[in-house]
Amino acid sequence: MSHRADHRSTPPAAQGLYDPANEHDACGVGFIVNIAGQTSHKLVQDAVQILVNLQHRGACGCEDNTGDGAGILVQVPHKFLSKVCTAASIRLPGAPGEYGVGMVFLPSHPDERDFCERQFEHIVREEGQVFLGWRNVPRDNRPLGDTAKKVEPEIRQVFIGRGADTPDAAALEWKLYVIRKRMESVISGSDLTQKKFFYVPSLSTRTLIYKGLLLATQIPQYYHDLADPDFESAIALVHQRYSTNTFPTWDLAHPFRFIAHNGEINTVKGNVNWMRARQTMFRHPKFGADIAKLFPIIPSNLSDSACFDCALELLQATGRSLPHAIRMMIPAAWDGHESMPDDEKAFYEYHASLMEPWDGPASIAFTDGVMIGAVLDRNGLRPSRYTVTKDGYVVMASETGVLPIDPANVLEKGRLQPGKMFLVDTAQKRIISDDEIKAGFAKRSPYRKWLGEQQVKLEDLPRRDAAPFDFRTLLARQQVFGYTLEDLRIIMGPMAVTGEEPIGSMGNDTPLAVLSTRPQLLYSYFKQLFAQVTNPPLDAIREEIVTSMVTTLGAEQDLFQETPEHCHQLRLQQPILTNADIETIRHVETGRIRAVTISTLYEVDGGEPALKSALDRIRREAHEAVLRGAALIILCDRGVNEKLAPIPALLACSGVHHHLIREGSRTRCGLIVESGEPREVHHYALLFGYGAGGVNPYLAFETLADQCRRAALKNGKGPVEFKTAEKQYIKAINKGVLKVMSKMGISTLHSYRGAQIFEAVGLNKVFIDEYFSRTATRIQGIGL
């Protein structure tokens, strides 16, 4: 194939209304497996037929011969590779598992391609493995459209033998992971003009991936290997991509190394931030210095599916089974599930202390080359149907009928249920039921015992009295925090009486905050995102069982291990804290759970420099407190007066949240906001979306207490008492936040926390990058 000029091979940089961080897709996914693990070329042919029959679920560009992406994942075809490697003068070891094979996308420019290959060979040897050789992958790009050809990489296979100090196939698999991550870092940090062409679809002893910017029908035409009768597998996973709002590229085609995905990961920004923050805590006596070579676990500018695959790859590398790792990332709805066995609930509750769910509508097929299966999100918002045949095959896909099967050969048909997992283990030569999978998880460790010994519940702590109300200065403090009569009468009052968010017009004719001539709270510069395109919202009322406002606060532990101390955190049944709750938490000293309060006030006469200095101070104090062992950081703006003004609670919260992420200490603490500023649902949604685990709106409660004192709040029975008003207000806020989450298809507060499901309007990029990192701000404006 002739050399091509340099072209874009990845999505363009953020510009105008486009941002590569919003890469999503909706697709067709399917797999076929021989339950007994018997390999055949016929199975590969059937998998290609499934892929072709799913083509209508994909898409093409303005050229009808340029697709959004398609691919197939198979077991390493040892018989075929032995034959072609012999012809290429590459000496493979005699048994599978003694070597790894990688599919590698390389720059089209010869010099840059040679550089990548030399670096690959060098790193293989540095990691103590044996470089065996390169093989050119036979291809025919004549059916491809011009767009696909312009960004087409060179594609070669690399073969790596097990080194003398690598004891077994599992150790080699780990080393291949390290080698690939090191190569990604070297090339991304290089000055190659075509470094975006470099990508490793697979590098494994067990699996091999053929994919690209292709239509399903082009896969067998483009990759000649798939037609060879010796190309055999017992497992095949296929995917046809439909890019709903993205720029298709060769590397973003599925399958990825472990999954093929149909759906959306709506919390991906937060998931990626949390994973980056966890990296500094990774320790393992077996892997040692190798762990640091894996960073970043999730590189920048990946699609939501690719990010999910990177996180899953890490969890699987920690020694957990693939189904276990999947269940950590996509847990079933357990909090409100009354009929779920207690030991199964304990499994999910324990793992909620380790990491947050990756939430959103998703059907994910997964495989490690031995097991293959699929899982649906807790809402079941993506289809998956399966057929089990009498001659020992399973076919699963986004729809039924993807492969002609004689009705007389059908043993069982069904559809995957919400939150359920379907699994075939070719090593055990059987289908493993969802109940058996979950029972195995529950028996892995004594999770309920650990939770009983280590988890701390707020309601079980010694209670402290709330700070007394100061009605004498109430009006002055309300004015400082920007309260209006509308807040008191139209928003807060009805919530405190009815327990419901007040109903208002859908229209809003007020000016954008940045254009308003009146002072505006920082919250007003942010707009909530909502589910769109193929991404459905939830009905949080009818589907209450799948939603949860439970959250845990405190220090996380190393993801590479599971110990009782991993669940030593503070559990909140809901995140709105009363004034008594915050005093109770402030004085907690249970095990390693200890709180530190940091003032978020600044000297108002100092203007912008004083504000920036105060932000630097609270971020520094928060990081230092974490290093000294604080598990809870309370950001408090009590004490305002004529000299001291409060930093906007959202700015303080997000500023600390992102600073701790950059410092690598964010997962060692929980953030609590104690502020007089928040009072309506949008305020709380933003605080949770930018990292807060709990909020104490002390001035809102004091305002309600004053209204009750003056008998301004009444229901059908007469004046409302403060305790009732407080309870109803908390209920209304929780329901309102849940409604906001539901509009984005997110089920749990745990996954919504830090997910940043917002965009800014009228805030400049320098300000956003510093304090609200990775938030879109397409229309810029003011700064600090």
Image: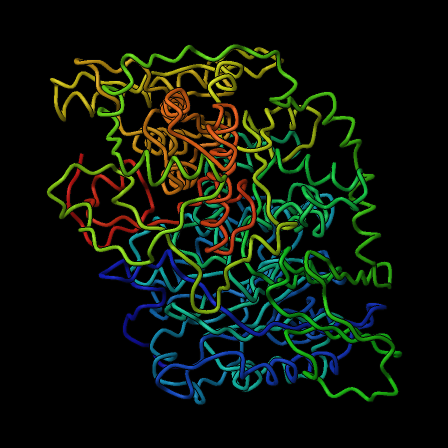
Residue 731, percent across and down?
Answer: 52, 37
Task: Report the residue at 19% width, 24% height from top.
Answer: 611
Instruction: Place residue 605 in its image quadrant.
Output: top left
Residue sticking out furthest to the front: 717
Q: Splitting the image into 4 quarters, where does residue 146 fall?
A: bottom left
699 is higher (above) or lower (below) than 374:
above
Looking at the image, is 342 positioned above or below residue 35?
Answer: above
Q: Is residue 231 left or right of residue 392?
A: left
Image side of residue 262 versus residue 15, left or right: right
Q: Quadrant of the N terminus?
A: bottom left
Residue 500: x and y in percent read 48, 43
- Residue occupying the point 60% across, 22% down: 458
Place of residue 374 in the rendered image (x, y in percent of width and height, measured from the top left): 69, 62
Is any part of residue 206 visible from this angle? no
List x then y, in percent, for residue 424: 79, 63
Relative to 765, residue 55 above or below: below
- Nearest the viewer among 768 and 118 is 768
- Quadrant that contains the C terminus: top left
Residue 697 appears anywhere in the view: yes
**Along the viewing direction, whichever of 363 and 78 lies nearer the viewer:** 363
